[in-house]
Each structure stands twice: as C-alpha cells, then as structure tokens.
Image (spheres, grey):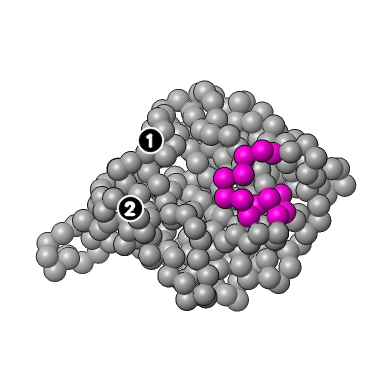
Amino acid sequence: MRRAHVHAAAAKIRSLARLEQLLDAGQGVSERAYSEMLHEEYSSEEGFSDLSFTTIAAAGANGSIVHYSQASDDVLLTDGDLFLVDSGAQVMGGTTDDTRTVVVGSGTDRQRRLYTLVLRCHIQLARQKFPEGTSGAALDAVARSLMWNAGLDYGHGTGHGVGAFLNVHEGPQRLSPHGSGEALKPGMVVSNEPGYYEEGWGGIRLENLYVVVPDDDMPPHPSGKGWLRFEPLTLIPFDQRLIDQEQLSAAEAAWLDQYHERVLQTMEPLLASEYRAWLRDACAPTA
C-alpha cells in the first residue's frame, strides 16, 4: 500500500504542476482535459493497473455535487474557480483514493476561510490518538466538531475503509455517524475527507488515506488498552494559496509543516527536475 501511494502521489503531483503551468500560460483547460491528463500520468507509473474509480474533476459550482463524475469538455477552469479533484489508482499491491481542492489564480477571503476550516477538521482527526476499541462513529465526530462549532456540516461520512488492490470502499471500518460501530484496529486503512459544499458556489474536500498503527509513546491507558494513531499514506501537498495561516493553531501549523516535510522528503527525489521546484514551493513551511 505504501509503495502504491508513492506512485499515485507522483502522478498527481505532476498533473497539478502541469495544470498550474498551463493556466499560468493562459491556456484553457477543461474538466475533461485535466481528467485525461491525470489518467495519463497514472498510466505512466510502474505497476499501474486501472483507476480506482472514475475521477471527479469538478470546477466551480460543480464542486458542490459530492459524487460529480461527468467531467466536461465544455466546463473550462476560470480565474477564481475552486477545482475539486477526487481520484485514485489501482497500483499493483495497493489502492489509492485522495482529494485535493485547488484554486485557479488567487482565492477570495471566503474561499480561504472555508478551505482552512475543512483543513483544520482534517488535521484534527489526523492528529487524534485513541484507545483500542474506539469506533469509527466516535472518530467521525472528532473531525466534524469544528464544522459543527461553526454552524456547518457535510452530508457524508468522514471516512471509509479501503482495500489493498481491492475495493476503494471496503468495510467493516467506516468513519460515519451511521457507522457499524466497528472498532478501528492496527493495519486498517481509512480515508479522512471532511468537506464543505454550497450549491451554486462550489465545494471543498480534502482527503488523505491513513493506516491505523500502534502508538507506543502514550502513557498506559487506565484500563490497560493500547493506544492507536493514524499514519499518512497519501503524500500530496495541500494548496497553500487557500490556507489562512492566522486560523491555524500552533499545533495545527506544526502538523501541516511536518506533513509537507514528509511529502517533500519522500517525493522530491522521485520527480523530474521540472517538477521539483513546484513541489518545494507547495511544501514551503508556514510562516
């Protein structure tokens, strides 16, 4: 699974860098054109078998459709658009699924505020340590609580299980208010994908896959249970043009810097020189 995610991340990083270069040069890019470019990048990776699912490439208002899957030649990315890309690959030995939302040009204050809120929900869950026996429903609330405190919500579960070269939605684990109650166990892979959606405006979703691992650095649990934590599998930077750093706590900023450093150290050596500068900029530390 880890190797599969490195291959998938390399492909998506290249596609996002190419997209930015095309847009900066004033070239028109449609939803479908980007989707095909991403498929091309996935296909170039060793061990690629197929897409995990039909890529969601949703520009502008289309991002509010959670399962939008009709990428169009007629919808061009325009300045100020949010562009939500939910994609994945079946790479020999592993299945990937990730979502990044990027902005065309520079974001508005409202886009940055809402993007940063979704990112904080993601980070809150990613940082959470929890005792053995904790259900996915309990962890769903960890991510969702910041959204609730802002008077907002999203209409899907925070996460789902993922198979290894199998199904991209696979149980029994699920992070949802309507989950099965199944406890998370070491070795389980789950998504972390909070979002914000507004009809006519667009959508924001930020998704990584994580594997559940033991946390031996925690003090003993009063009942003798072991502690668990999440380790990231997805290695793709978040769009820092949309991050309002003043909204981040010191702990959240530290997590983001550590994550981006992990992305940079793992992925930079695997990229051609024309993509390395883009990745270094994308992974720059918070101020």
Q: Residue furthest left?
A: 223
> Are circles 2 and 1 on residues that touch, CB within 8 Å?
no
Which one is in front, 45 or 27? 27
User: Is residue 220 shown to the viewer in this render?
Assistant: yes
What secondary structure is marked by label 1? Answer: loop
Which one is in front, 37 or 254? 37
Residue visible at 57% across and 50% down in the picture: 66
What secondary structure is marked by label 2? Answer: loop
Which of disc 1 and disc 2 is earlier in sequence? Answer: 1
Task: Report whether 109 appears left or right of 100.
Answer: right
Q: Quadrant of residue 229?
A: bottom left
Residue visible at 38% across and 65% down in the picture: 142
Q: Position of residue 160 (x, y in %)?
A: 40, 47
Q: Which residue is mark 2?
A: 179
Which one is in front, 71 or 273? 71
Q: Quadrant of residue 130?
A: bottom left
For the record, the magenta segment spans: 59-71
Q: Nearer the viewer, mark 2 or mark 1?
A: 2
Q: Position of residue 119 (x, y in %)?
A: 54, 62
Residue visible at 48% across and 49% down in the picture: 208
Label 2, label 1: how many angstroms apart (C-alpha)? 17 Å
Q: Quadrant of residue 134?
A: bottom left
Relative vertical location of residue 33 with respect to residue 190 in this rendering, above or below: above
User: Is residue 257 shown to the viewer in this render?
Assistant: no
- Can you tell which mark lies on residue 163? 1
In the image, residue 274 lies in the stretch drawn in magenta: no
Task: Report whether 230 appears left or right of 55.
Answer: left
